[in-house]
Image (cartoon, coloured by chain):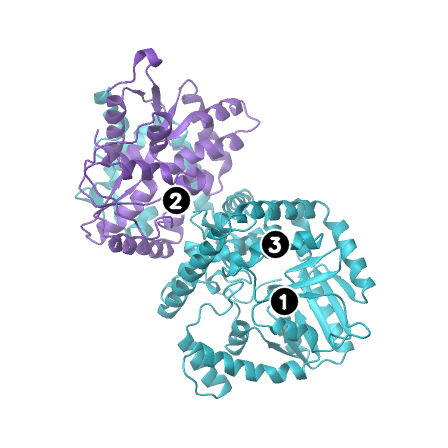
Chain colours: A cyan, B purple
Amino acid sequence: MTEPLITTPLRERAAQALGDRFLHEALDIATTRFIALRRDAFGDFPEGEALRDRARAIKEATLQRLDAHLETLVANIERLGGHVHFATTAEEAREIVLDIARRTGARMAVKSKSMASEEIHLNEALEAAGVIPIETDLGEYIIQLAHERPSHIIAPAIHKTKGQVADLFAKELKREVAADPEELTRIARVELRQKFLEADLGITGANFAVADTGTVVLVTNEGNGRMVTSLPRVHVAVMGVEKVVPSMTDLMVFLQILAKSATGQKLSVYTTLVRGPRRPGELEGPDEFHLVLLDNGRIRQIAGPLREALYCLRCGACLNVCPVYRQIGGHAYGYTYPGPIGILLTAMLEGPGSVKDLAHASSLCGACADACPVRIDIPKMLVELRREIDEARIAPWTERLAYGLMERVLASPTLYRWSKPLARLLQRPFVRDGRIRSVPLAFTEWTRTRDLPALAPQTFHERWPTLK
Amino acid sequence: MSVSAAAGATPRVALMITCLADMFYPEVGERIVRLLRRLGVEVTLPTGQTCCGLPLFNSGYHGEAAAVAARTVTIFRDAEAVIVPSGSCAWMVKHEYPGLLRGRAEAADAERLAARTWEFSQFLVRRLGRTTFESDVEGPLAYHDSCHLLRGLHEGATPRTLLNNLSGAAVVPLPGSDECCGFGGSFSVRLPEVSTSILERKLANLEASGARCLVACDAGCLMQIRGGLARRNSPLRALHLAEVLKS
């Protein structure tokens, strides 16, 4: 599936984002706050580190026998009267949901926040089929009004300031309103209440699905997840296959670290457990329950180089601490999943060729791996992706030539020794007071904003004989 | 001050000067040699060394990086201990060489080299047990964690021990000291605007800290931070830890 968003190169997209003062301010405030909240949450929770190890081990073991766990999950959901569908591609997943919508005569769908539904571009497909999708998570509601896409995995409207949201509400809802988060939330709440009652279809993602019990688990803060799963007559959950966990005991391990990593909360405000459709005697819940299990490139990676990315809980902690994300925000990445983990997920979904530039959108500082609740070694996989891109000869020939030359010089002490007098000769026109302010070719990108040190009059190797 | 001969032979170390320190910061190497000699350590500079290969490795050119790594492993094969003035290069040798050279003739030597390689501050504190030095520069100083030393080699406390015990200069905390400076090797020229924007955050934090001098243990970070300070004609300085400790 090709993404329609990308029409300009990464570097330009990034530069554009850097020039947006509001974006910069919004990102700085939000990520700084998320980082502090997460640090405090784990600071007050000494067993957190051991739980992270355990969570990682559960993910690893679950993937080893993913087929068996999925079979158990399917059997249990069917036993509860629900339906399970397998989708190999995003297109298949869309078709399954549209089919359900057609068959049940649905005209409006309320949605709780779901990255999986973003990944398969479900909203556009629903609209085209005459079903109105309504996002009910406040952040998602805001960006749907703005005709944008999420720029953060858990805080989709992180790129907007409250002033911008007030302007948006004034324009789209024809409501003059102060830039006050409480007031803005109240308006959204009133607008959404009617939609919950009108909608035929409730669409959600899933943070987890417990195989043993057939339970789909939603972690939310606004209560909209409960409305979406209990008011409409049909509930459809879309979930990546890797989100299955074997048992409720395993689920408890993840619930103890997920919200702490995401927002610094001990638990999210709502943890919604859904088991199939409404049963006789129950007062609320849908007539029909469907789970769409999405592959879309995931299963191939169980034995692939991106395997560890399948451990991801979608908490967003790696985005908050990433120096690159903090500067450019999520939209500049250009795909559904932004940030360090997003680069890996994009490679998973769209193939390594799609990230030939994005794979380099990291200084490999390792803050992401440190913050990840399941300790995904993101920098290592980014380097691995770069290697794959290099070996597939996707990188430009000029770059491959330059690195080939670098190897020649570094692997030969003679060439290395002689490169220095040569460099001294070449740098001579550009050196002032031992520094270089502007230089053509390879380092021109450096010297636009930073001075470059001049090669020392005597290198250390050249000085060594006098040091002996 | 020398280590007593009765307690064992004089410690001998081979210096892996690294390409950046060799070409741009030779004074860092000189100070390390003088300091170690004063502490009774014999320092050698194995001939034929060039670069650890990290720039090749991080850009995905692993065949090329392995060729450079294999040479380095051979050159340092007989060294009792190897000292490296850059966290990232030390990390490359300790963390990536064994995997990169697995299955090759140099594999066993790579494992041994990884175990015997020390980053500069690590060697002083953990190997020599030396933690008190005089400062050669005026404070206040602020410490910047280089990413590979902090998150790769888990050495956040070791360099700080040296700074906090320093006589003659105050040390102040650097806000966001564990945040990347934006260097990232080829990242700094592939996405120069983003790299610079990250650097600006670091420089703003340095200014806010009240320090007159930033101290780091990585030549890559120093190139980036000094480059930014110089371009802004800032009166603040950025020095390698070895330039701060009186030799």
**Residues at badges 1 and 3 in contact (C-beta under 8 Å)?**
no
The image quadrant that residue A337 belongs to is: bottom right
Residue A459 percent coordinates (x, y): 25, 31
Amino acid type at mark 2: Gly
Q: Are marks 2 and 1 in contact (CB under 8 Å)?
A: no
Callout 1 crowding tier (Cα within 10 Å): few <14, some 14–19, many ≥20: many
Q: CA distance from mark 1 to mark 3?
A: 22 Å
Q: Secondary structure at mark 1?
A: helix
Q: Is residue B14 left or right of residue B66?
A: left
x, y percent for residue A365 = 43, 47
Q: Nearer the viewer, mark 2 or mark 1?
A: 1
The chain containing the residue under callout 3 comes to: A
Q: In the orientation shown, which residue stands out farthest toward the top?
A: B6
Asked whether residue B50 is in view, the answer is no
Q: Residue A117's mark?
A: 1
Residues at discs 2 and 1 both on one chain:
no
Give the alpha-carbon distance from disc 2 to disc 1, as whole Å: 37 Å
Q: Give the residue pinned by disc 2.
A: B185
Provide the residue designation for mark 3.
A254
Q: CA distance from mark 2 to mark 3?
A: 36 Å
Look at the image and tell me in which quarter the C terminus of chain A lies. top left
Q: Secondary structure at mark 2?
A: loop
Foreground residue among B4 and A374 = B4
Q: Position of residue A133 (x, y in %)?
A: 63, 77
Asked which secondary structure carries label 3, the reply is: helix
Mark whose residue sits in front, 1 or 3: 3
User: Looking at the image, is A271 positioned above or below residue A301?
Assistant: below
The chain under label 2 reads B
